[in-house]
Image (tube, rainbow, N blue to C red):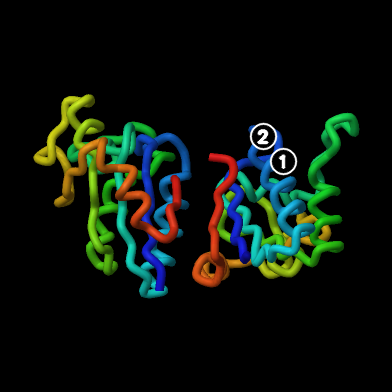
Amino acid sequence: MKNFLFVLRHSPHSGSGIRESLDMLMTVAAFDQPVKLLFLDEGVFLLKSGQCPPNPAMRPTAPLFAALEIYDIEGLWVEQESLSERGLSLADLILPAQTLGRADIASFLAAADIVVAC
Amino acid sequence: MKFAIQINSAPWENQGCETAYQFSRAASHMGHEILLIFFYHAGAYNGLRWMMPPEEESPLLKRWSILAAKEGIDLAICISAAHRRGLLEQTEARRVGKLDDDLAPGFRIAGLGLWVDACLKADRFLIFGA
């Protein structure tokens, strides 16, 4: 048993990377390993409500995160500064998340056995 | 020490693949065990047989194959990442009615389960090529 932490730092439509990272995350969850998600920098936009991707080739990614509820994910954390620097608050997000101050990120990362930067 | 390694970028994108190669070779020579090198995202391109970079760029592809043959390191490309990018292993290609045989010697196709398994068995997990 190992604690996995996925760190998501890219905006929703910056490529197929998000979709592939979520595949990894779901595989880890399917192996009954504890999984946490941390949203940093542009990654906070992944959880923003009201996304309307104009390009039909880029399927919306927000529903993928909404579907995480059926997996046994330990929780979602969002860096407070990443939110406020982009004029966002927890009320703008599609899923319940906990905030974490920038000063606490290092110890949060250190507490995980496996950190997967996405 | 046992290492699991993940490579996320194509060989021409950045220094990450070369660094991963050098690290894996050095660690193996020092007696450490590389349980798995898992190619994900654009990293899948590392195993593309048909890459023809100029010789003076010291193609990594040949060196990966030699590493696999000499050190017995498992080079696994994620099947879904490979399929998304049109890289088909021969048996799989025949199954879907295509003629491809895209993987260079030493590489194989595998699923994400193999990656999780290696992460769980390894003492250290490293990602190269953001």
Please rate how many residues cluster around mark 2, counting C-alpha atoms within 10 Å: few if below 14, some from 14 to 19, many from 20: few
Kindly check if marks 2 and 1 are in contact, taking CB atoms under 8 A apart as contact.
yes
The quarter of the picture where the N terminus of chain A appears is: bottom left
> Is residue B6 rendered to the left or right of residue A90?
right
Percent position (x, y) of residue B1?
62, 65
Residue located beneath label 1 in the image: B18
The residue that appears at 58% across and 53% down in the rendered structure is B6
The image's mark for residue B15 is 2
> Is residue B15 rendered to the left or right of residue A70?
right
Q: What is the distance, in whole Å, between disc 2 and disc 1 at their CAs? A: 6 Å
> Is residue A99 rendered to the left or right of residue B38?
left
| Vertical comparison of A66 with B57: above or below | below
Percent position (x, y) of residue A85?
22, 25
> Is residue A34 rendered to the left or right of residue B25?
left
Please rate how many residues cluster around mark 1, counting C-alpha atoms within 10 Å: few if below 14, some from 14 to 19, many from 20: some
Indicate the quadrant where residue A22 lies.
Answer: bottom left
Front-most of residues B127 and B93: B127
Chain ID at mark 2: B
Front-most of residues A15 and A71: A71
Label 2 amino acid? Answer: Gln
Chain ID at mark 1: B
Query: Helix, strand, or loop for circle 2?
Result: loop
Query: Helix, strand, or loop for circle 1?
Result: helix
Front-most of residues A67 and A89: A89
Looking at this rendering, what residue extends furthest in the right direction? Answer: B55
The residue that appears at 56% across and 52% down in the rendered structure is B126
Percent position (x, y) of residue A69?
23, 63
The residue that appears at 56% across and 58% down in the rendered structure is B80
Percent position (x, y) of residue B123?
54, 65
